[in-house]
Image (spheres, helix red, strand yellow):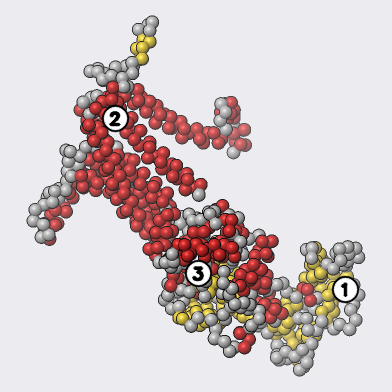
Amino acid sequence: MTGVIDRVAPLRWTARGLKWLGLDGRGLVVAVPVLWLLVFFLIPFLVVAKISVSEAAIALPPYLPIFDWDGIVATITLNLGNYGYLFEDPLYLRAYMFSIRVAFVSACIAILVAYPMALFIARSPEPRRSVLLMLVILPFWTSFLLRVYAWQGFLRSNGVINNFLMWTGLIDQPLVMLQTDFAVYLGIVYTYLPFAILPLYANLVRLDGALLEASADLGARPWATFVHVTLPLSLSGVLAGFMLVFVPAIGEFVIPELLGGPDTLMIGRVLWSEFFSNRDWPVASAVAVAMLVVLVVPIMLLRTVQSRSEDG
Amino acid sequence: METAPLQGAATTKPWREGTEEPFVRIGRVTKKFGDFTAVNDVSLDIYKGELFCLLGGSGCGKSTLLRMLAGFERPTEGTISIDGQDMGQLAPYDRPTNMMFQSYALFPHMSVEKNIAYGLLRDGMKKPEAMEKVADMLRLVQLEKFAARRPDQLSGGQRQRVALARSLIKRPKLLLLDEPLGALDKKLREETQFELVNIQETLGITFIVVTHDQEEAMTLSTRIGVMDAGEIVQVDEPPAIYEHPASRFVADFIGSVNMFEGHVTDDEPDYIRISSRDLGQDIHVGHGVSCSMGQRLWFAMRPEKMRLTREKPEGVINAFPATVQDVAYMGNLSVYRVKLRGGRVLSATRANLTRHEEDGISWDEEVWVSWGDTAGVVLTQ
């Protein structure tokens, strides 16, 4: 490799330039994701944070600049009222609490469903394992929006499920399922299930079979082995799977919009209506920033627990 | 700790008398994985208090046999009984056996104490009582100070002792050990070998040890079962396995050996003579062998039973001229590679009795290789 770089002049100059910047091969590898995060996460976040402290206006863009320079004096106007507003109107607090509840319950259900599936895949012999994993990922090949729409067809009053139940005679009135919280839970669990299965699978497949044998050898029946060995050793996988469902579910917009009722007040919907219906960008930005703060806390928690389990 | 009766296997040898009922009976056991036969028609009786070694190369079926005793694998054919109880379809958790795993298989999320207590707690023992037993066991394996540590905070030798303690805590009728010393370095292995024998004799538990290390098998065991290609080829006490191997495989597998192929040229009641193409003259064997004239057989000669001299030794029939090709100094002994006139290279060892052997036999010297007429083993298979 070095040989090529030394021989080709442009490469050599680039390498020298990078070295001058203090970047060697190792630094370059790290630089790419750092640059990515900077451009696509940190800068947009700063823009949103800036908007969240400006004042709404009927203008284009619909907020006043926070910097003002009349040639002599520079003024910075910070409008923290947007955040205050989030606390004044109970709508926002209720939406946050409801979102967290929906996300939490959905994540718990997803883990309960995902665990046996992940365990089954991890214990399957090798050729079948890849097929099963494929099947878990397969739904991603269809648009997420289409799949959520398809659920409408299932859950409607004259949808597949109700028609079937009426045909069997189990019910004579269609069940109301669409536009309920139940439909939202169902949609979220269905959509995010693969995100719960994959980290759990990755964890369980690494579990040393000798530990299970040792447990059985020492007198533990299969259930006791699961409770005392398999489950505690897969906790980091459980937590990762939980977070991968919980975090995106909090800000979910499409599922409550398509499957939930008018009173399914999740923060994603509030954000959307604030942004597009009310055109109040500063409040919408404040909602977004507050949501990020709400999310950072559980992520930090996850990280400390994970690093502790890695330390042993 | 209560003092268990000293059941030193060295004092009694029930397999010689054949009056005692065997403790473990393996009856015509075969295990197949698809088309592959891992264990082929093995029958074996092991007596109470024995430290029995299953010895063989990798893939010889010794681990599969052990796993069938533990209940992790089911025999395709045949029966296994322990202490008169048929193991049949019993699951591992219902068997009176415990196993020490080659990888130790310690639970990484539990402390040493909890690892050892695991078996007792799963049997429903109350925690204070279990912890008392654990404390006794920790004393036995000298790990009192490490009770609260996690397995990854221990050295290899300490982990090995935790694994041993965990498998002993339930006082199993039969302890199965899969390469118990395999992961230790040589020095530690030698020390631990004797410790293992001591613990076995103190507790009087029957041990079955799987190993590929013949030295380990020699030191540890009351008897050795040598396995090859899924079959038991010889079962005997360690000295008998070494001095009276039943076949070429055993002679070759246990220790090193010089093997001569030849045929019988003289078959008398008190001696035979074997002619081998590798040697310029016949080998004289000073005892009768049940064979027939002209029969093809093999003569096995251990390197340490041969003598190297500069002069032709007086009154020895089996003496052959050779040239020293190579000398490997091993510290306690030296290994000589000598080339016979016919081109065959033999290895012979000499104990290094003195520190300075300036006129010792060296490279390219003309020497005589000789052995007594009962030093070698005649093998017919």
For label 1, the residue is B309
Q: Is residue B330 above or below residue B56?
A: above
The image shows residue B295 at horizontal and vertical percentages of 70, 88
From the viewer's perspective, is the residue at label 2 or at label 1 nearer? Answer: 2
Distance from the alpha carbon under mark 2 to that under mark 1: 97 Å
The image shows residue A233 at horizontal and vertical percentages of 44, 54
Chain ID of residue with mark 1: B
The image shows residue B319 at horizontal and vertical percentages of 85, 79
- Viewer-closest of A67 and B135: B135
Chain ID of residue with mark 2: A
Report the amino acid beneath label 1.
Thr
* Disc 2 element: helix
Residue at 14% over, 53% down = A162
Residue at 53% over, 81% down = B23
Chain ID of residue with mark 3: B
For label 2, the residue is A287
Instruction: Report crowding for label 1: few under 14, some 14 to 19, many 20 or more residues within 10 A (C-alpha).
Output: some
Instruction: Report crowding for label 2: few under 14, some 14 to 19, many 20 or more residues within 10 A (C-alpha).
Output: many
Marks 3/2 same chain: no
Residue at 69% over, 80% down = B240
Q: If you read the primary sequence from the N terminus, does the residue marked by circle 1 or circle 3 appear first?
A: 3
From the viewer's perspective, is the residue at label 1 or at label 3 nearer? Answer: 3
Distance from the alpha carbon under mark 3 to that under mark 2: 61 Å
How many numbered marks are there? 3
Q: Is residue A197 above or below residue A21?
A: below
The image shows residue B73 at horizontal and vertical percentages of 46, 71
* Disc 3 element: loop
For label 3, the residue is B170
Report the amino acid beneath label 3.
Lys
Outermost residue to the left: A172
